[in-house]
Image (tube, helix red, strand yellow):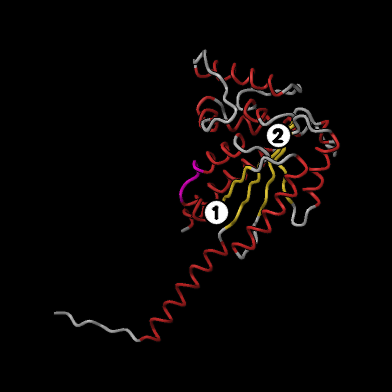
Amino acid sequence: MATKVKLDNSYLKKLERKEYKRKENFRTKRRFYLIVCEGEKTEPNYFNSLKQSLPKGVLELNQIDINGTGKNTISIIQEAQELREAYEQNYSRQIDEVWAVFDKDSFSSQTFNTAILKGKGSNPEIHCAWTNEAFELWYLLHFNYYNTGISRSQYQKKLEQEIRNSSGNKTYKYKKNSNDMFKILLQYGNLDNAIKNAKKLESLYSDNKFSNHNPCTKVHILVSKLFELTKEYASQKTIK
């Protein structure tokens, strides 16, 4: 019968300290992204689906929290600032990046421009993944390049037609708060083309009169950043 080895208490405590330090180092190195959405369902549903599509290892190294506020364009920046403070107090650490996701919609030009500038002027900055006119523009860019400003209802009609053409489902109806849009866009659209089309639109404008940037979206910047986490994770695994 093998002799049991009894470890000294001081050694056990040393191991416990090392394990605690290892977990603490992991926690502090884990990046934290907070995404605050103007809408309560459409945008949060899209980003939650994107988050769920990321490899498990990416989510172990990066905390991504998504919050649908239902706030309007200006108050969403204030809400993002308050949520940052609440999260940092709760987790006892800084959030690496805060993103506000909102649309121009029917808000006045002054309100829309002020919200974006307020985000840029925040310390730390609140990044704005805004869209002019509506979030559905980002969906449409998965299929084709659109550079004419249209209303939200027109976006929805065009989106239905694009998905019908690509899927063969001639009766497809767009559901604004659907949980399936991320999956549908990946299956029938093209994410790389959406990013290229969004960048092409972005290049048309260079001033701070953001309300005149129509159509335009900055959603591709946030989406690209989230998918970049997968590439970083893959490269880390390769190095190891």
Q: Residue at x 52, y 14 (%)?
A: 171
Which quadrant, please, contains the N terminus?
bottom left
Q: Nearer the viewer, residue 16 or 204?
A: 16
Image location of residue 50, percent across then percent down: 54, 40
Q: Residue at x 74, y 23 (%)?
A: 147
Question: In this rendering, is residue 143 above or below 27?
Answer: above
Disc 2 marks which residue? 199
Which mark's residue is nearer the viewer, 1 or 2?
1
Q: Secondary structure at mark 1?
A: strand
Question: In this rendering, is residue 41 above or below 66?
Answer: above
Q: Amino acid at mark 2?
A: Lys
Quadrant of residue 128 within the rendered picture: top right
Crowdedness near tag 2: few (<14), some (14–19) or many (≥20) residues, C-alpha within 10 Å: some
Question: In this rendering, is residue 171 above or below 44?
Answer: above
Q: Is residue 237 shown in magenta?
A: no
Which residue appears farthest toward the top when viewing the image?
170
Image location of residue 200, percent across then percent down: 72, 31
Q: Is residue 54 shown in magenta?
A: yes
Q: Which residues are magenta?
A: 52-56
Q: Nearer the viewer, residue 200 or 135?
A: 135
Q: Secondary structure at mark 2?
A: helix
Disc 1 marks which residue? 62
